[in-house]
Image (cartoon, rainbow, N blue to C red):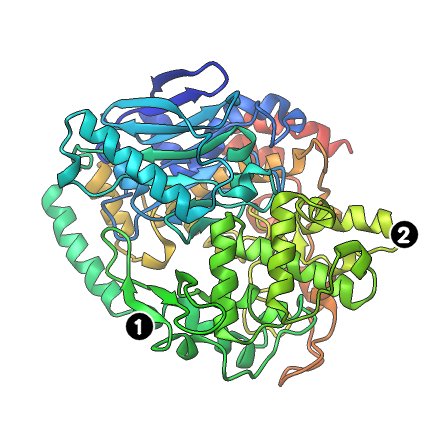
Amino acid sequence: MVRGYAGKFLEVDLSSGGIKDVTFSDDILRNFVGGRGLATKILWDRLGSRWEEIDPLGPENIFLVLTGPLTGIYPGSRVCVSGKSPQSNGIIGSTLSGEFGNELKCAGYDGIIATGKAEKPVYLFITDDNAEIRSAEHVWGKEAPETIRTLTKEGLELLKRAGRGAEKIKEPAMIYCGPAGESRVRTAAVMQKISHAAGYGGYGAVMGSKNLKAIVVKGRKPLPSVTSPETVKILLREVERQLLERDRLRRWGTGYGGYEVGARQSSEPVRNWQEEWHDEKRFGGPKFDFRYWVKRYWSDFNCPVACMKVAVVKTGPYKGAITDDPDYEMQAYLGPNLGIFDPDKCIYLSALIDYLGFSGINGGNTLAFAAELYQRGILTKEDLGFELNWGDVEAFERLARMIVKREGIGDILAEGTYRAALKISEMKGVDVTKYAVHVKGVEVGAHGTRSGLDFNPIAYACSPQCGDHTSGVYDAYNDARIVFFDSAVVCSMCGSPLIWDFYKAVTGWDLTDADWCRVLGRRIMHIQRAVLLLGGPDIFWRPEIHDDNPPRFYEPLPSGPYKGKTTDRKTFEDMRKQYYEAIGWDERGIPKSSVLRELGLEDVDKALDKVRKQ
């Protein structure tokens, strides 16, 4: 057995209740590693021949929860969720932090493959080399705190009943979907703890579509053994030393950007990206510090960076709201993007969105889209049932709850910003897609391109993960490196040049940065690109049209020190052309046959023939 892996995966057929162990060959693991990489392999092998027909919210889709060989060993432990995305109709590898991946490996599994659909709500309970499907009807419809409390208590009781000394061990880990996922809101997140989310991809909705409320796991075994234990110890000490030098990240988390990205870089979404600059000094990193933080350094297992913070509103109408910091993306999307510049309100909304299992980035984008339509008189009080003005936190809460329950206009907005824009355009007889800030159905991260100081013009447009800010592309070489972090399943913010040595010390496999960026990572990106172009069944993307930025990114910035600047269309088109050539796509953006065959993807090449003929 390859070191660094537990050696088997758990496959659960939710339709039949069947549970079995499956394995993958060393060759597959070596080429696709784990997490995002292995997800592309599994999904392509099982669904690729009929990709366009697969409904991401149907029982034929596969929900994947995968670790990697470095999970739990290298700093920054995470777990990767994937499947056919109900947002992009492609494959997105979406990771979230917490101890779930460690517990799963310690229970003897490298991942979970969930197929089918349970007749009634269920959750999966996993212990050492064992799993069972249990009823989740009593927590269906419950928000995060009650779900966590109930299933944690049950988990401990089950462990105690099994004679496993529950009174001496820490609580089990779990991932779950909230009410948003249960309602198949396409922007629903997979959650861990009260505030850790895998928001991109809409996999909370995939869990909901399978009636799978949660997966609870407790492992009592050690982490898998490594090839060179002493080398791992030496490398771990050095990587930790390097990470401890990231002082600003540890002190402030990414939340310091809540003011800086807007004021200094003019690249923060403000009122649905109508602006990207603000100078609201009452908002941003330092304003969330002593007044709110009750835990200054919060990290998951084995992470010395500890960039997370626990923030609590201590007084006033929002007293008791508790969440993680919020980080930069949550500050931006649930702050200035909604016209909110009050930390109390931002923390309150962030906590609410987490409790509902709604993605803060994607969901926040949709809320702002609706608010702009109201500002422009396209959506009215009659459509909404109330006024929706910028900065009105109670109105945004009301709209978020309507989306989660699919009530009224919320049923349309639950389809995500782009699909909602198509429906509202038809309903109102006016094109509102120009106000939808997304790339191929995925709402973009909180980093703009217009000022030229933050993301580059093709970062989202050419990414196989579309609007995902953690996977923006640039030169078709270095872009593959993030795929490695998502496949080894560790936090990319814990990156070190020693990670390749670390990988060899754990697995015993030689892998260089060049090998990964030229071949292995590129192969994974090409599979992701292929299924994105195959798409379906409701929406199909055409690269000549959809490899582009949202229309708003070509409007001149209306305010701030970079007023008048915009994403230059010719620069964008030149960069896109260069990117196509560098990565191996033709002039239309379709992977070339020669490149796919060079990467050993002959079946992918054949499947793309239909796209080439369009």
**In the rendered image, the vertical position of residue 181 relative to residue 376, given as above or below:** above
Q: How far across and how far down the image is residue 46, in percent?
A: 52, 22
Name the image quarter holding residue 540.
top right
Q: Alpha-carbon neighbours of circle 1 within 10 Å: few (<14), some, or many (≥20)?
A: some
The earlier-in-sequence mark between 1 and 2 is 1
Tell me the mark number nearer the camera, choosing from 1 and 2: 2
* Identity, as a three-letter code, of the amino acid under mark 1: Arg
Question: Which residue bears the numbered disc 1?
Answer: 251
Q: Which residue is mark 2?
A: 429
Residue 352 appears left or right of 167: right
Residue lying at 60% horizontally and 38% vertically, measured from the top left: 184
Q: Residue at x 28, y 34 (%)?
A: 155
Q: Name the secondary structure under disc 2.
A: loop
Give the x, y percent position of residue 28: 38, 27
Q: Quadrant of the C terminus?
A: top right
Identify the image quadrant of residue 493: bottom left
Any part of residue 211 in sight: yes
